[in-house]
Every structure is written in C-alpha cells, then in structure tokens.
Image (tube, grey):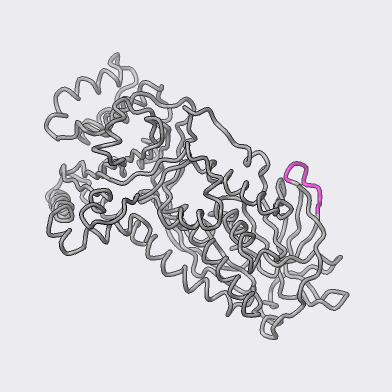
C-alpha cells in the first residue's frame, strides 16, 4: 500500500508545546511532510485495535490516521488454516478484551470456529502436590448469576484478520501503510507555508522490500505500538526498566487424546502445573476440536533440548511434565543421547511407578504435536517509566512486557488501545490538542498504574515459584509454605472471605 497525500488539519499548537523538547533533537528542513492526526507504528493487535477503535467511533472517525507496518497486512487479512490445524501463537482473551472487540464491531469478524472459551482452571505445584481449582461456571450457579468465561482462546492471526476485516468494513484501508518501514524519526521545522512543526515528530518512510524512499509524514500524535525494542520509545527518550528471566517459553499446538478431560462436567478447563526445579510452569490451554495450546516456561538449555526432539519424543516429554515428579523429569531432560532406551520407553516405565501416587491421572494426555509448531521465545519483564510524552503515546509491548504465565500480555495491549482511543475521543470532543502532554495524561493516568500492577503481580508470582527449588531444609520450608498457601486459597474460608473471588477477577483481567 502506498502513502497518500493528506489534507492540512487544524494548525493550532499550544505555546508550551512550541518550545518542548527543542534542545538536542534533530530536525528536518526539506520538503513539507504530509500531515496526519494519529500515526501508529506497528501493525500487531494493539496497533490495529487502536486504528479500528478510532475509526469506529463517530467522535474520531474523521481524523487523518496512518498505521505503518513492515509486513504485508493484505496477506494477514486473508489468513486461513485447515480446520484441524492451529497456529502456535495463541492467546487468552479476557472478558474485558472480548467486550471491547464486540462493542467496536471487530469480534463479528473473528472466526468463531477458531475460538474456545473456557470457564475453569486447575493448577498444581509439582514440588508439593498442592492444587487449586477455579470454576467460573460453578461460581455463577452458586450466586445465581449468568454463566461466564474466564477467557477465550484464539490464535493471534485469527484476531489480526478480524481487526483488519473490521478496518476494511469501516472504509479505512487507506490508513494502512503496509510493506512500509520507518527509516528515521526526527523533529520537524517551521513549515514554509507557516505551519510550525517544530515539536511534531516527522517520520521518513521506506519500502520494506527495496528500501526505496516513499514519503515523509508528520504526526500530531505518534503512537508506539512497535514492540519490545520500540523505536518510537527510543525517539521519545522514554526508558524501560526490568529484567530478563533467563527462561524461554516453549510453545506448540498439541492434540489431546482424552479430549473430554478438557470439558469436565460441562466446564471447559485450562491446566497449569508449576515445575519450580525445571524453570517454570507448563500450561495446557484449550483450543477447538480436541486441540490445545502448550506453553512451557523452562531454562534455555531445556528449551533447546525440547526443540531438538522428534515429535514422538516431544510428546513423551510433555506427558512426563504433566504427570511425573521433577526428579524424573530432570533425569529425562539430561538423558544420555547414546542410550538405547527411548524417551517414550522411559516415560512409560516411570508412569507405571509414580503417577498413581499423585492423583494427576485426570490431566490431559497428549496424543500428538502438530508438525512444525514447536518454537520458543525468551521471557522478560519490562515496563516503561511513562506511557506518554509530548505528542507521544506507547501501547502494547512498547509500554510493557510481561511473563506469559498469566496470559495477560495481549490483553494489556488491547486495554491500552481502548483507553488511548477513548482519550483521543475526549480530546476531540472538548476541543483539545490530541498530542498535548496534559491531554495525554488522561491515558497515562488510566493505564500506567494498571499495567504496572498486572506486570508486577505476575512477576511476583513467577519469583514465588522460583524459590525453594533446591534440596535443602529452607527449600523444603518454602515449598511447604507455598503448598499451604495453595490449599488455603482452595478452601471454603477463602471462598467465604472473597479472597478466591479476587484471584478469579484478576485472572479475568478485571
């Protein structure tokens, strides 16, 4: 898609903004750039959701917008897979996220046959066999409320295609600058025609395929939806603090043999088992047709080993992670390659001797793994020191990156997009400059604390399960205390006092 010329918009710029950030910032002084109200860099779900929300609101649909993406969005809008195949990039959408997508008209374009709501979770700690069950269906019956889901699983590509189809329905395809990359971002100059762009970000655009120059555009509001290594955040001089976990998330699409386990007494169940001595939890998240999305957080060495296995061996290791003790898993992960005993033989022998002791036979049994679906990615925690600056806003991974154990990364990005779109609508309705720092504080005030609380809470939960991974007395004490905590939250007292309900609300993203 090509950049189109834009008409001039209102030339009002507040006096404070005229002098903001002039010192030390490079400027452009060549031909006048095209003028846009909102420019988003990054065509992932967060950026697309922002554009879709702006175009679906009567208050902001008239704004001149652009979304810049290096990939081919036309191909992504036509994404499809056979009914029995699923992408390994799948996410849990909370009820709040689904409500946002429904109200803005995007959910109607998400393929429902590739979504799977679930309303129960079962969580185990492999160090002490403690467990806790969350059943939203039973909770609704108990309080005579309408049935609800904790989340809805779908592939990221299914969501992206739905957002793009909604954007097309809104007649906003000309806002999509596909196959385009940002070669530089600099501050503008006073326009020769009298428009002062000295505090406006000006982006130079190039073709993704051949790096040929396309155009220059100026943004009244520049939105960074450009991921973990956000160039927009770097341009704005906004720091991001956090750390790497030295862990990788191994993902795959699996087929569950006893798929009825995923639907226990009418409740669709997600499973998670914490493996502290192996580096993190393993989660089985239900997809349609007896399939599930696997996310296994573990060490880089273990991740590399798992990716090197044949399909049969990989399935054996996943079943082992769901059923065996951590000492058995450690042995299997470090098994001598020269041994004549296969991992499948090893698992089957050990299963006969230990599974009956732990009461985990109701966990799903993995039958197969989808070809070419095993992959991994590094796990990290980051949060920007602020979400806004003069004519700058950050959303999605550009603003915060969270451990996947609670499945909240994509939901945070959608909530950011929703809040920023509402802030822009408020500014337009009240005659405010949408790029003014004070105006953008409405968005930052709404999302900064909520995002930090979610990211920090997930980080604390992760570290809690990294303690007590040794074999000494203190490790046993920590593990035992953690087990008592899980049993407490699964008790009737926790339900009566509302503590369990609060955890369930957190899982819903509310």
> Does the magenta-highlighted stretch encompass residue 66?
no
Q: Please identify the quarter of the rendering in which residue 362 is found.
A: top left
In the image, residue 94 sits, relative to residue 117, either above or below, namely below
* Number of numbered tags placed on the structure image: 0
Q: Residue furthest top?
A: 340
**Quick check: 54 left or right of 27?**
left
In the image, residue 421 sits, relative to residue 67, either above or below, namely below
Give whichever of 190, 23 is nearer the camera.
Answer: 190
User: Overall secondary structure of the magenta stretch?
Assistant: loop
Q: Please identify the quarter of the rendering in which residue 220 is found.
A: bottom right
Q: Could one spot residue 334 in this view of the protein?
A: no
Q: Residue furthest bottom?
A: 15
- Residue 73 in percent (x, y) is at 66, 44
Give whichever of 80, 248 is nearer the camera.
Answer: 80
- Residue 416 in percent (x, y) is at 51, 62
- Residue 215 in percent (x, y) is at 80, 56
First to last magenta residue range: 208-214
Q: Could one spot residue 494 in this view of the protein?
A: yes
**Quick check: 464 left or right of 411?**
left
Q: Residue at x 64, y 57 (%)?
A: 41
Give whichever of 318, 379 is nearer the camera.
Answer: 318
For the C terminus, the image quarter is: bottom left
């Amino acid at each position: 898609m090509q950049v189109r010329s834009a008409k001039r918009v209102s030339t009002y710029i507040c006096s404070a903004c005229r002098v903001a950030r002039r010192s030390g910032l490079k400027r452009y002084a060549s031909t006048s750039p095209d003028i846009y109200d909102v420019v988003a860099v990054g065509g992932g779900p967060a950026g697309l959701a922002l554009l879709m929300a702006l175009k679906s609101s009567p208050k902001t649909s008239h704004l001149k917008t652009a979304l810049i993406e290096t990939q081919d969005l036309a191909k992504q809008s036509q994404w499809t897979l056979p009914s029995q195949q699923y992408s390994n990039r799948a996410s849990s959408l909370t009820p709040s996220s689904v409500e946002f997508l429904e109200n803005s008209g995007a959910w109607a374009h998400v393929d429902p046959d590739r979504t799977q709501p679930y309303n129960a979770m079962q969580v185990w700690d492999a160090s002490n066999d403690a467990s806790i069950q969350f059943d939203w269906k039973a909770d609704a019956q108990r309080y005579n409320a309408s049935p609800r889901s904790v989340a809805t699983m779908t592939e990221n590509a299914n969501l992206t295609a739905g957002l793009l189809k909604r954007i097309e329905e809104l007649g906003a395809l000309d806002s999509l600058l596909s196959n385009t990359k940002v070669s530089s971002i600099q501050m503008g100059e006073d326009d020769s025609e009298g428009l002062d762009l000295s505090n406006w970000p000006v982006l130079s655009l190039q073709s993704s395929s051949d790096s040929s120059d396309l155009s220059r555009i100026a943004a009244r509001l520049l939105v960074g939806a450009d991921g973990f290594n956000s160039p927009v955040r770097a341009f704005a001089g906004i720091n991001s603090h956090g750390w790497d976990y030295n862990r990788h998330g191994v993902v795959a699409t699996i087929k569950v043999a006893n798929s009825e386990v995923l639907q226990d007494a009418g409740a669709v169940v997600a499973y998670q088992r914490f493996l502290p001595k192996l580096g993190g939890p393993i989660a089985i998240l239900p997809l349609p047709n007896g399939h599930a999305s696997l996310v296994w957080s573990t060490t880089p060495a273990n991740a590399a080993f798992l990716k090197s296995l044949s399909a049969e061996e990989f399935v054996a290791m996943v079943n082992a992670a769901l059923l065996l003790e951590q000492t058995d898993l450690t042995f299997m992960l470090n098994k001598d390659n020269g041994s004549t005993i296969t991992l499948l033989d090893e698992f089957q022998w050990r299963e006969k001797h230990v599974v009956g002791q732990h009461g985990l036979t109701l966990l799903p049994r993995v039958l197969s793994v989808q070809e070419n679906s095993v992959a991994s990615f590094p796990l990290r925690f980051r949060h920007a020191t602020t979400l806004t600056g003069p004519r700058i806003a950050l959303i999605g991974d550009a603003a915060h990156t969270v451990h996947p154990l609670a499945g909240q990364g994509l939901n945070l990005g959608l909530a950011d997009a929703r809040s920023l779109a509402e802030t822009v609508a408020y500014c337009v309705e009240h005659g405010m400059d949408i790029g003014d720092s004070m105006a953008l504080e409405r968005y930052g005030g709404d999302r900064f604390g909520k995002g930090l609380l979610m990211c920090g809470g997930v980080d604390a939960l992760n570290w809690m399960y990294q303690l007590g991974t040794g074999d000494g007395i203190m490790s046993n004490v920590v593990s035992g205390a953690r087990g008592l905590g899980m049993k407490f939250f699964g008790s009737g007292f926790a339900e009566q006092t509302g503590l369990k309900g609060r955890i369930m609300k957190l899982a819903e993203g509310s």
